[in-house]
Amino acid sequence: MLLEVRHVTQYQYEAPVRESVMELWMQPQRSHSQRLVSFELELDPPAKLFSYADAFGNAVYHFDVPQPHDRLTITARAAVETQPPPPTPEHLDIGEWDRLRSDFVRGDNFEFLHPHGFARETPMLHAFMEEHGLNRLRSACPLTAVRELSKAVYGAFGYETGVTRADSPIDHVLEERRGVCQDFAHVMIAICRSWGIPARYVSGYLFTDRKHGDRSDPDASHAWVEVFLPSTRWIGFDPTNNIEAGERHIACAIGRDYSDVPPSRGVYKGEAESQLAVGVSVRRARAAPAEPEFLRVSQTAMPRNGARRPGFSALLQEQQRQQQQQQQQ
């Protein structure tokens, strides 16, 4: 399936700010089931882009707008060819729990086995697990347990935007029993890790299809969960829609939770309040492009009178704002 993504993020400031420094986790990954055909970033005001790979191997772009501006617009465009993942077994033998407890598996997946940020155990989470009989799933094989967990999260929470925020703790969605994809992913990750199953957060996009019963917002980015089982390696589960991740999912970045891989995050100098607008579209491409795989990012030169970038520590003394990206809205 060939899909095209357009993701526009715009910050509007009530008065000009003096400088913005941003990081972006928007480039789709390259993997056995996903081919990145093209990727392009456009910035307004223009700025020079730099990139690096973070600790999890994600592509991160960063830039500095060092002159006064009252608006910042980031437009990401991508074309991605996806393939259906290999069929998942119906079940695994009960010995998979022993394999999960091996020193090799635990050492290799240490970061995805322990609480972090929003994905952590709380008394309310334990009560939720007891209420829905999730503790007894440990008597089943791990694959069956994870499938049933995804189904339970899907059934226990209503999908509703505006109830939670990007920085809402896990207890917020557990209390409200409503939320969005980011919240459901954190709940599922925390429970998987409590069982000793490595689980990681996946940020990306979903080509929604109401015929399949998708309840995700088609105009937003998406999040789901991948779990590691020794016999199958990483498998994706989407508790928002009660499906396994497939060719309609486009993965951009993986992390321990949302805080590791927000689509954008940054700081700015200035006293002005800001408003954020986000628009996302994911659609089928009409035909496969003839050109070879390429990557293009804007490399517009800085204005001749552009200021030099100050030390990052100086920026931290100004107002800091983490992207409240409506990944979940």
Image (tube, helix red, strand yellow):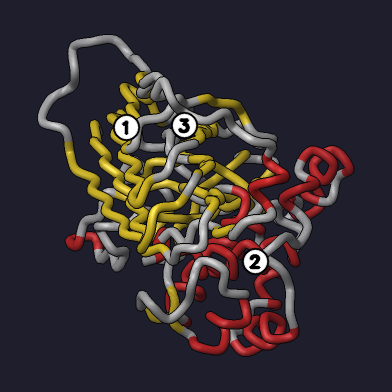
> Could one spot residue 92 in this view of the protein?
no
Helix, strand, or loop for circle 2?
loop
Name the N-terminal-most of marks 1 and 2.
1
Name the N-terminal-most of marks 2 and 3.
3
Asked whether 81 or 162 is in front, the reply is 162
Marks 1 and 3 sit apart, C-alpha to C-alpha, by 19 Å
Marks 2 and 3 sit apart, C-alpha to C-alpha, by 24 Å
Image x and y of residue 147, in percent:
52, 62
Query: Mark 1 against mark 2, which lies toward the viewer?
Result: 1
Residue type pointed to by label 1 = Glu
Q: Which mark is residue 235?
A: none
Question: What residue is shown with label 3?
Answer: 29
Residue type pointed to by label 3 = Gln
Helix, strand, or loop for circle 1?
strand
Q: Is residue 115 left or right of residue 327?
A: right
Helix, strand, or loop for circle 3?
loop
**Residue drawn where x is 79% and y is 42% of the image:** 105
Is there a contact, CB below 8 Å, between mark 1 and mark 2? no
Marks 1 and 2 sit apart, C-alpha to C-alpha, by 31 Å
Residue 33, image quadrant: top left
Image x and y of residue 261, in percent:
56, 48
Image x and y of residue 163, in percent:
43, 81
**Residue drawn where x is 33% and y is 27% of the image:** 40
Seen as rendered, the residue at the extreme right is 103
Asked whether 242 or 37 is in front, the reply is 37
Numbered marks: total: 3
Question: What residue is shown with label 2?
Answer: 118
Name the N-terminal-most of marks 1 and 3.
3
Q: Is residue 293 left or right of residue 107?
A: left
Question: What residue is shown with label 1?
Answer: 42
Residue type pointed to by label 2 = Phe
